[in-house]
Image (spheres, helix red, strand yellow):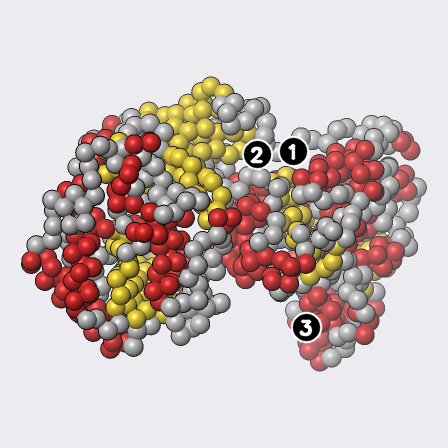
């Protein structure tokens, strides 16, 4: 038997709202009764068994009962939100997601939308688990592109499909032309910064204003429900936006016609007694439109504008609005939009139904009917309905190659025009890349690009490469990349068997180490002994446990892929250190060298063929070994299904002058830690501090690491209440005092062991 769909929110109503306090009922709507519009629409558009869940659902219960989680989304993409907790719960279900009506919240420019870490995690989770993300409009689409999420479709809001009449727009126009202007509703925001234009509109409507709709804030909704408490009176007097500025008699009349709804169908039904709805609240207006009444959105920000534009409902801008001519502007806007609305909605409905089908969800019959409808040109005297405008072009791409000579990759578009790509090196703009031949291996609308690197631009041996879409500034996938541009790079690559690449001619002499030709001297072993003894003493003094994790050389993990004539010896530095630690009698310190676990990895490669670092899979195997040594309950290795394959940078490939990426296993899991501090230093000396609300606050990790540690940090930081990570081979005594860790971890690549760690 097929499992049902779990739908976030309500089915479009708050049950028994009449006997609930306003704060409780209002909270169930998502703190804006306008949310009931798209929740009602979503519920009615999905055929088959479904049930609702709240935002604070139990992931285990949903995983057990549902096959898919549907998220009727609001303006989640907002700089003021951190939706990390919601992201964590969705991720924990392990279920596919279907996101409908996702919006970005900005006043004037999408540059305002700088996502907090938790919300960015949520967006990337949507990108991973949705077949297609249904977004509200072009501004939201631009935000997704900036964050590298490209599997979206601009479809407006589900509430656009509430009314099943395929000729609804023509009927609205005919009715409005009939002359009804006597009964109008007004849906304002009550925000203080909108008080000027909202007060002007209120005045302009005069005696025709018979209803004011309160969607938000809570005091407005409470006032509409008859709350006359001192707190509400204080809000009305000082914080109710334009209402606070009304003369006493006019304010009393406004309060008398104030309405709030906790059922979308009751709201729709109430609007049928009106001639039209005007508002700076998009759903307050759109429900009137869906009820078959003329509407006008007065937009003060990008979120309302993009939604009205996408759906094709009448729109004017608040800025510069001449309220005295409001009804004339409404006449013009309704005349312009209503005739074209039906054809536009039919196209959007077809794409919306296709998006549902892509998630293996059957569209409701009325949505299928709308998708198949062909609005008649000139119905009821309306002008011929043109086809809906083409969706804005979407663009994405991949940075594949970067060396001293050139930067190259591919770029794709939803339209048959190649987008421009801009290349930067350490922040310096090198100009637009040349667009080359079609890349049919990627898609029908994909092209190669490349740019020659000027010699004068190579100012350092290690530099940051960026490839961005010129139109939006969005990074291409795999961009930015920090890579080496040293002339002798190719000499550092040893070609092994089956396409495996290894290091050679490096400053640590890795080939000499693994073959037993470079062993630790007595002085070096003494230095190691001094370090371990101080580490152990520090752990004892802190009441902590300490671990030294050695990331095995790739050459040791894949010894059978080394070229003929090179054999791994047991007489190498790591084995000397293992023997040393066994003889020191350490009390709170353990050495972890997960060679066997990585060598026997089978489901995914522990190290990519073309990279000297471990893969996500290899890192999680090492972490499982570390957790087992800690005695933690989380000690099982990673599940195969937790990984997907993606093309990622490969540092050894990048030294050879060709394509620098290869398919690698990438962890699907979304971690819950939040970055709270970063000194911005590149590599050695970089310090970052993390917090995780879901982990015990008393658990504190201090970690010193090298590049291999980057793969471990997100998972580790999600296991401790606080985590401090420093990119360094040594430990600072003052940092131990500052952090007071309960766990100390030093991670070091095996090839670096010829330089003993120390305390500073």
**Residue at left 75%, top 75%?**
21
Q: Quadrant of residue 165?
A: top right
Confirm or deny contact between disc 1 and disc 3 (CB under 8 A): no
Is any atom of residue 165 visible in this view?
yes
Within 10 Å of the Cα at label 1, are there few (<14), some (14-19), or many (20+) other Cα atoms? some
Q: Quadrant of the C terminus?
A: bottom left
**Residue at left 75%, top 29%?**
387
User: Which residue corresponds to mark 1?
Assistant: 391
Q: Which comes before the other along the chain, label 1 or label 3? A: 3
**Residue at left 24%, top 56%?**
728
User: Which residue corresponds to mark 2?
Assistant: 394
Secondary element under disc 1, as helix, strand or loop, is: loop
The x and y percentages for residue 134 are 65, 43
Q: Nearer the viewer, residue 561 or 176?
A: 561
Within 10 Å of the Cα at label 3, are there few (<14), some (14-19), or many (20+) other Cα atoms? some
User: Which residue corresponds to mark 3?
Assistant: 235
Within 10 Å of the Cα at label 2, are there few (<14), some (14-19), or many (20+) other Cα atoms? some
The x and y percentages for residue 395 are 53, 33
**Residue at left 33%, top 31%?**
499
Confirm or deny contact between disc 2 and disc 1 (CB under 8 A): yes
């Amino acid at each position: 038997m097929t499992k049902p769909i779990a739908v976030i929110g309500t089915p479009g109503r708050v049950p028994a709202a009449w006997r609930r306090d306003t704060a409780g009922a209002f909270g169930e709507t998502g703190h804006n009764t306008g949310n009931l519009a798209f929740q009602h629409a979503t519920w009615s558009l999905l055929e088959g068994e479904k049930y609702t869940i709240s935002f604070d659902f139990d992931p285990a219960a949903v995983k057990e009962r549902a096959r898919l989680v549907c998220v009727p989304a609001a303006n989640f993409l907002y700089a003021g939100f951190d939706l990390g907790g919601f992201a964590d719960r969705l991720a924990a279900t392990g279920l596919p997601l279907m996101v409908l009506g996702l919006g970005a919240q900005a006043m004037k420019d999408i540059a305002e939308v700088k996502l907090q870490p938790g919300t960015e995690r949520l967006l990337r989770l949507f990108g991973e688990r949705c077949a297609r993300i249904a977004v509200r409009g072009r501004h939201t689409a631009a935000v997704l592109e900036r964050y590298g999420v490209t599997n979206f479709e601009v479809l407006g809001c589900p509430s656009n499909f509430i009314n099943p009449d395929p000729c609804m727009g023509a009927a609205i126009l005919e009715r409005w032309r009939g002359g009804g202007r006597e009964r109008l509703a007004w849906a304002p925001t009550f925000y203080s910064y909108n008080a000027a234009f909202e007060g002007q509109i209120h005045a302009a409507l005069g005696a025709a204003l018979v209803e004011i709709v309160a969607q938000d804030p809570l005091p407005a909704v409470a006032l509409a429900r008859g709350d006359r408490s001192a707190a509400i009176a204080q809000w009305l007097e000082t914080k109710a936006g334009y209402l606070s500025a009304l003369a006493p008699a006019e304010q009393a009349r406004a309060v008398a016609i104030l309405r709030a709804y906790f059922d979308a169908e009751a709201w729709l039904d109430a609007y049928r007694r009106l001639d039209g709805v005007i508002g700076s609240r998009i759903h307050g207006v759109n429900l009137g439109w869906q009820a078959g009444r003329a509407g006008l959105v007065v937009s003060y920000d990008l979120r309302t504008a993009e939604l009205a534009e996408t759906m094709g409902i009448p729109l004017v801008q608040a800025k510069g609005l001449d309220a005295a001519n409001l009804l004339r502007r409404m006449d013009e806007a309704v005349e312009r939009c209503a005739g074209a609305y039906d054809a536009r909605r039919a196209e959007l409905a077809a794409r919306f139904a296709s998006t549902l089908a892509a998630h293996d969800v059957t569209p409701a019959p009325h949505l299928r009917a709308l998708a198949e409808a062909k609005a008649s040109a000139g119905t009821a005297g309306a002008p011929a309905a043109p086809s809906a405008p083409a969706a804005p072009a979407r663009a994405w791409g991949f940075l594949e190659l970067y060396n001293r000579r050139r930067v190259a990759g591919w770029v794709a578009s939803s339209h048959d025009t190649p987008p421009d790509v801009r290349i930067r090196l350490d922040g310096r703009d090198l100009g637009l890349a040349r667009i080359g031949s079609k890349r049919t291996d990627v898609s029908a609308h994909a092209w190669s690009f490349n740019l020659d690197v000027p010699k004068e631009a190579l100012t350092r041996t290690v530099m940051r490469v960026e490839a961005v879409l010129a139109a939006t500034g969005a990074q291409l996938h795999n961009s930015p990349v920090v890579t080496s541009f040293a002339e002798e790079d190719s000499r550092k690559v040893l070609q092994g068997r089956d396409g495996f690449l290894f290091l050679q001619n490096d400053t640590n002499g890795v080939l000499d180490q693994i073959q037993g030709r470079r062993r630790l001297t007595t002085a070096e072993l003494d230095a190691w002994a001094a370090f371990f003894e101080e580490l152990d003493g520090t752990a004892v003094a802190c009441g902590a446990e300490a671990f030294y994790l050695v990331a095995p050389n790739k050459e040791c993990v894949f010894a059978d892929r080394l070229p003929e004539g090179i054999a791994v010896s047991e007489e190498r530095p790591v084995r000397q250190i293992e023997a040393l630690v066994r003889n020191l009698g350490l009390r709170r310190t353990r050495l972890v060298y997960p060679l066997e676990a990585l060598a026997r990895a089978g489901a995914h490669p522990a190290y990519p063929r073309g990279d000297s670092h471990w893969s996500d899979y290899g890192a999680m195997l090492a972490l499982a070994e570390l957790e087992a040594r800690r005695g933690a309950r989380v000690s099982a290795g990673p599940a195969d299904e937790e990984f997907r394959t993606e093309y990622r940078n490969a540092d050894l490939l990048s030294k050879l002058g060709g394509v620098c990426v290869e398919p690698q296993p990438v962890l699907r899991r979304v971690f819950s830690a939040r970055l709270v501090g970063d000194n911005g230093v590149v590599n050695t000396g970089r310090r970052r501090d993390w917090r995780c609300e879901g982990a015990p606050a008393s658990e504190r990790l201090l970690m010193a690491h090298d590049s291999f540690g980057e793969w471990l940090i997100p998972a580790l930081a999600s296991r401790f209440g606080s985590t401090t990570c420093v990119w360094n081979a040594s430990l600072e005594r003052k940092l131990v005092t500052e952090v007071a860790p309960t766990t100390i971890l030093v991670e070091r690549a095996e090839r670096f062991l010829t330089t003993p760690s120390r305390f500073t």
